[in-house]
Image: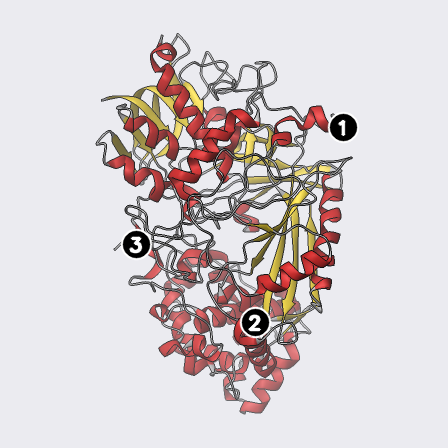
Amino acid sequence: MMYDICVIGSGAGAGPIIYELSKAGFKVCVLEKGEAYKRKDFSKDEIATVRRDIYTPKLDEEYHTIEENIDGKWIKFPTYETGWSFWNGNILGGSSNFMSGFFYRLKPNDFKLKTIYGKAKGSNIEDWPISYEELEPFYDKVEKIVGVSGKPSFYKHQEPRSSKNFPFKPLDEHPIVKLIDKASTQLAYSIVKTPRAIISKNSNHRSACYYSNYCGSYACSSGAKGSSREALILPSLKTNNVTIIPNAFVYKLNVNEEKKIISANYYTKEKKSKEIKAKLFVVAAQAVETSRLLLNSKSEAFPKGLANNSGNVGKNFLSTAGGVVSGTFDETNMELKQLLKPGLFVNRAIKDFYYTKDFKGGMIELVFDHANPIKRANSLKWDGSKLLIGKALQDKLYEKFTKTRTLNMEIFVDWTPNDNSFISVDEKYKDKYGVPVANIRIGAFKDDIKISKFLEEKAIALFKQMKVKNINSNISELPAQNLLAGGCRFGDDPKTSVLNKHCQAHEINNLFISDASFMPTGGSVPYTFTIYANSFRIAEYIKKNYDKIMT
Amino acid sequence: MKRREFIKFSTFTFIAFKSTEVFAKVFTKEDLLILENLFEILFPKTKEMPSSKQFGALSFLVKTINHSSFNNSDKSFVLQGLKDFNSSFPNFINLEKQKKEKLIYEIVNSNDYAQSWLSKLVYYGIEALLGDPIYGGNKNQIGWQSLRHSVGYPRPKLKYGQKL
């Protein structure tokens, strides 16, 4: 069978392509590395979901190498040795199943940071080849189709919106927001309410959020969370134009003499190699794996990897650094019954420092520690370097669980692209299939940590204003392993970018990349909303230009 | 992990460890007895909290350690540590309760290997205390109830995220 379109991956970058093109009548084949779970398969099982590798590969079978600078030398650490997993949900719908779903758009100036702030020495920063205005209609579309709940906030950096309101009213808020809003006002911070890709009323096959108390890290059991699986793939199946092949790990894309991709090779769970033929290929395997696939797809026409004759594939990997400032609340801050209320959302952020006059700042998201009691209890077993056991351990668990609650301020800052932040492959490190794994060099730009520290001060000030006694701060330049972007950035110049402004490979007409790989800069927010919006934009281009692309 | 520092308590000679050999045997009766005693020292009954026996720490470990999702290096470490402990303190089981406690409290924060190994047992004890009862611990949700934890629903019908 020759498909019109083969999509590799099924997460946020893939969903809009599958949804839009199947509705337009194209025959779409989806190759998903993981299992095709259904909503009823999910539960709030901390052991399965968080403590074991159930929805991600086992690290001793499939892993990454992480290249860190140790005393001036770059050293590779396989993740099966460190346990620092960079997998984020290998199932139908990808990691969008497990997101917390706070959905912020990028802002107009995020598309032109180089123009506004200049290019520091050692930075590879580039402006985007498109503007906010070009992406805005697709953000709007995501709000309506994927479903975003919230209420627009008014502060000086608020981006323009074509729809006045969000299609779903805000989710119910935890009473702690009264304390946050009061302290924010006292500090002259704007009150910014978090929009979420979680619906607050029933819509088609999806039921409203039921405040399970187990949201971030867990797949949703009502369909309220706007995962690619719930919001886009399930509706697309009704077209009968979509074929989903789960447990299909794509390891190579094959080209013909005309430099067109003709097929994808994948391994089944049983390690059998199979081939799928299609006229057009869209890769959305999450940023690291997308670059890996291209780099591993070497051929006579592309000896350095697919679409990589320019040598740009894998370059300028992005993540989000920052860190977390935590504050522990107790009955001196608010009535315990109120403080310990489960399930409700905090839905507050600090965004006044997103831009400053002299440098690009970032944002702070306020969120309770996830419910995960095993994770929480395990963090309590230490008293400095001393392991607590016996009555001391039991008493501490009881006191902390029943009388305190921790609020986190998660700091998000831009990751400045640079020569020491990239994805590569190395023949020495192979997975269980014998395929070279991705290496990620995680060198942060020297000035990025200063922005995190600048925001740390703002977070601590807010906790102090709320009279929180126990404040802990962990600022780091290490990447967040669930926020991966770049590696195949888009741009107008084929010498310095992999993709054109439509996210079509400069070097191969029938190859598009629709995950976060395209991003030259990532903004100071999680990427999922922008991935969805951009993927809808790509889908529209393919839909309108399919015949032209094929010629 | 500084295994050799732990072993200094005895004349035990380290023999190269092959995980497959140990996994085949898993726990002997003596191992189970040692673990049961250790878990009771790590998680004793208190005014507010259940003891390890009450919430099922040992039953949880026995039921989960052989599953393919159990961390392989943790599994090796739990089993090798047990072997080393037994070699270092062959008379542990026969000691009076207070002497057993005294010994564990003496080594827990004075010996790196002992601390690492006991912290691993504490971790799996915590999994037993607060994981879903489907895995063999948290009997009758006693762990969740003691800590007044609001359980998330739906609870699992099958273990390890198996598809229904």
To the question of a shared chain for discs 3 and 1, the answer is: yes
Chain of the residue under label 2: B
Q: Which residue is mark 3?
A: A41
Q: Residues within 10 Å of mark 1 (few under 14, many from 20)?
A: few
Give x and y (percent) for residue A528: 49, 39
Task: Give the structural element (helix, strand or loop) at label 3.
Answer: helix
Q: Is residue A453 above or below residue A507?
A: below
Q: Nearer the viewer, mark 3 or mark 2?
A: 3
Rendered residue at 45%/42% (across/down): A62
Q: Which residue is mark 2?
A: B118
Badge number at residue A120: 1
Determine the CA span between mark 2 and mark 1.
Answer: 49 Å
Q: Residues within 10 Å of mark 2 (few under 14, many from 20)?
A: many
The amino acid at mark 3 is: Asp
Badge number at residue B117: none
| Left or right: A221 as drawn, with respect to B30 | left
Determine the CA span between mark 3 and mark 2.
Answer: 35 Å
Chain of the residue under label 1: A
Task: Give the structural element (helix, strand or loop) at label 1.
Answer: loop
Q: Earlier in the sequence, mark 3 or mark 1?
A: 3
Chain of the residue under label 3: A
Rendered residue at 34%/65% (across/down): B155
Give x and y (percent) for residue B135: 36, 68
**In terms of depth relative to the viewer, which is nearer, A254 or A20?**
A20
| Left or right: A270 as drawn, with respect to B87 | left
- Splitting the image into 4 quarters, where does residue B95 fall? bottom right
Give x and y (percent) for residue A404: 59, 72
Whether residue A194 is visible, yes or no, is yes
In which quadrant is the C terminus of chain B drawn? bottom left
Rendered residue at 32%/47% (across/down): A203
